[in-house]
Amino acid sequence: MSKPAPSRKRRVAVVSRTRGGRAVYTLEIVAEIAGVPPQQAMNYWMQGLFGSRAAAGAEPVFDDDALYELRRIEHYRRHYGVSRRALPLISRLLREVARLEAEVRFLQD
């Protein structure tokens, strides 16, 4: 007799959309999608490594760009052994490269 296939739990992420049609996620959803504990995601956010600052007293919300940044940060930490102390520097450098690439595209048009 063959063994039954193990059951897989499927999770559903609740995503809201803003007027512009962009997806907006809570901290818990972003952390789950990126595969990091929510407290670690909160620490990264408080350090300014991803996302933007929320209004005073408001719960932070994140868009697809913030999710991409968080996943990229975790990728560098896990796969390349980048220390948590070096992550702010790498995050700033990656943002600066993206800004410069956008400027070059603008100037080429």
Image (cartoon, rainbow, N blue to C red):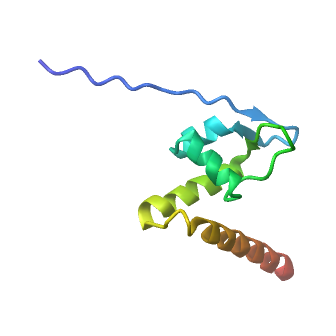
Residue 98 picture location, percent across and down: 72, 71
Q: Is residue 69 above or below residue 15?
A: below
40 sits left or right of 79 in the view: right
> What number of labels is visible?
0
Task: Give me the residue at 79% from left, 76% from top.
Answer: 105
* The C terminus sits in image quarter: bottom right
Query: Left or right of 75: which side holds 38?
Result: right
- Image quarter hosting the N terminus: top left
Point 52% across, 27% down: residue = 11
Look at 82% across and 82% down and name the residue there: 108
Task: Residue 33: give x, y in percent of width and height.
Answer: 56, 41
Residue 74: x and y, percent?
52, 56
Look at the picture and state if 33 lies above or below 44: above
**24 with respect to 74 (left or right):** right
Examine the rendered structure and indicate whether residue 109 appears above or below residue 8: below
Q: Residue 27: which quarter of the image?
A: top right
Above or below, 83 relative to 56: below
Q: At x 73% / y 52%, what residue is drawn? A: 51
Spot occupied by residue 49 in the image (x, y as percentages of width and height): 67, 59
Frontmost residue, 27 versus 101: 27
The image quarter containing residue 30 is: top right
- Which image quarter: residue 12? top right
Q: Residue furthest top?
A: 1
